[in-house]
Image (cartoon, grey):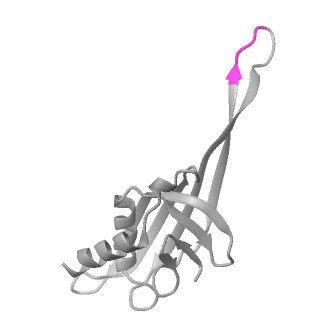
Amino acid sequence: MMMSLGMFLFSLETLVYQEFQRQTEWRHASTSRIGTNPARQFAGRGDDTITLPGVLIPGLAGTALSLDTLRYMADTGKAWPLVEGTGRIYGAWVIESLHETRSVFFSDGTARRIEFTLTLQRIDDGKVDLLGTLTSTAGNVLRRVLM
């Protein structure tokens, strides 16, 4: 396992990302002053974003069902704990966007190659009411797939 987002595991069987990009911002309020530089005051932490770009090659590594699972998780509006395979805990994250590009098709239209970019935003860890649950998500994803 490379990483888990909630109960979704990033691995060769599901979805493999090629890069882990993280951008953290800090806010500094600015007040104009006459005759000198603006005064700045630290206003706290800003956005924390993780971007996971990768390539999915169904039949070789991963399954397109994994992208559907992530979309359903995003549809819930819930936050998910993000844990690296090493055990490092990143906190609670929401899925902000999932970009997908399909190419190299079989004759029936099935894509042989799917490039994706998953973007996650960190939320306040104290808001545990926003966390998604395994039972409701797993059951609903399976129902959607089987229908």
Q: Position of residue 72 (x, y in %)?
A: 34, 66
Asked if residue 106 lies left or right of residue 11, the reply is left
Q: Nearer the viewer, residue 75 or 18?
A: 75
For the stretch drawn in magenta, the main secondary structure is loop
In the current view of this chain or complex, which residue is farthest to the right? Answer: 36
Q: Nearer the viewer, residue 8 or 127?
A: 127
Is residue 103 depicted above or below 132 in this figure?
below
Q: Position of residue 93 (x, y in %)?
A: 53, 58
Q: Position of residue 20 (x, y in %)?
A: 61, 67
Asked if residue 107 lies left or right of residue 127, the reply is left
Magenta stretch: give its range: 30-34
- Residue at image position (75%, 12%) is 33
Q: Quadrant of the C terminus?
A: bottom left
- Residue at image position (75%, 25%) is 40
Asked if residue 140 lies left or right of residue 20, the reply is left
- Residue at image position (80%, 9%) is 35
Quadrant of the image occupied by residue 56: bottom left
The magenta stretch spans residue 78: no
Is residue 131 depicted above or below 85 in this figure?
above
Q: Nearer the viewer, residue 26 or 56?
A: 26
The magenta stretch spans residue 33: yes
Is residue 122 depicted above or below 61 in this figure?
above
Q: Position of residue 58 (x, y in %)?
A: 39, 86
Q: Nearer the viewer, residue 87 or 104?
A: 87
- Residue at image position (42%, 58%) is 78
